[in-house]
Amino acid sequence: MPSWNTPHPTSLREATFSHKEAFAQNRIDDSGGKEEREMIRMVDRVVGQLSLADALALSDTTQLDQIATVIDWMPIRALLGQRSGPGKGNTSYPAETLLRCLFLGVWNNLSDPALEMQLRDRLSFRRFAGFSLSDRTPDHSTLWRFREELKRDGLIDRVFDEITRQFEQKGLILKQGTLIDASFMQAAARPPAKPKKGEETSARPSADPDARWGRKGKKTVFGYKVHNGVDDAHTLIRRMHFTDASITDTEPADMLICGDEEAAYGDQAYYTHARHARLKQAGIKDRLMHRPNKHHPLTPRQKQRNRLISKVRAAVERPFAVFKQHYGMRRLRFFNLATNRTQCVLAGCGYNLQRAAAVLFAVRKPA
């Protein structure tokens, strides 16, 4: 039986002091001890020290400022830890700063070189990332290396869990129901050429060795598949799973069920008798749509049940629509599963931050 109660990380690495603390309020947080501050100055590049010109240029509140306030960044900073420079004696950008930069790239569908240019020119980008007008911003190779760090150390998964944990504490995740679904994403590489007659393999393999062909109904895609478990209250993503396109929707479905929700909603691809039994044993209501077969067509009551479930589970499409229409992820950027997975989890974090800001600030607006 699958484990649906994966605990959030409980042990955090020691938090590091950052001069970007409360950057949006144009102040420097000196709460850390003198010894700690001296240690950080030796490791991380100091950014975000504001002048009068910075305060005047960055006076207007933007959507990015709202997003920056929806979580406490201190635990994220502690998870990421300190970074060493590329060489002896060199300082590096704080990890939180680079993470914020990557979020900007996701939200605006920017490649690393394009993000490098935008960080130089856009005041709202500089403020969200924690740069003053005089700070030097990272180049595209620095951004690439940091993404590799997130992938290699598994940090992006811990960041995702921490963001989700904070939204649970804020009451944005109600756990009344989890909506599960999956969506194809095209590989960056061209598909391999079909083998010629008499040949077992193609003379031109794909540049992406991990991408595979997948089919759903009449749709065939060469690439990958993103599987999401979404809370039905505000469509925040609680669980993500990334596979090649050949994996069926139902195989990783149990990983998308958290175990603390009241009900699980899914289309006909997810219903099995075994899963129904596991949900019942866990005390979770089965809201998976029934599917007919040639020997047992659906009864009128089952058809009505499916229609009611379909109305609720339709909201699971929101994150996929944002990924593809706004983040440019209809076609992925990278040429292997691990890096594409890291980018997708990063997009999941970014989506949750944007969505939470939209919910919280909509509530705060006066009538």
Image (spheres, rainbow, N blue to C red):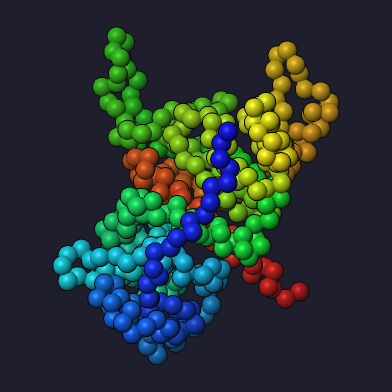
Nearer to the camera, 179 or 351: 179
In the image, is residue 29 above or below residue 76? below
In the picture, which quadrant includes the C terminus? bottom right
In the image, is residue 323 above or below residue 304? below
Q: Residue at x 17, y 65 (%)?
A: 87
Q: Residue furthest right?
A: 301
Q: Residue at x 51, y 27 (%)?
A: 215
In the image, is residue 70 above or below residue 252? below
Is residue 118 visible from the viewing direction of this image?
A: no
Relative placement, left or right, of 297 versus 88 is right
Relative placement, left or right, of 363 versus 25 is right
Task: Point out residue 96 in the picture as x, y percentages from the top left corner.
Answer: 39, 67
Q: Quadrant of residue 308?
A: top right
Q: Residue at x 49, y 82 (%)?
A: 25
Task: Point out residue 238 in the picture as x, y percentages from the top left corner.
Answer: 57, 50
Nearer to the camera, 270 or 321: 270
Q: Quadrant of residue 317?
A: top right
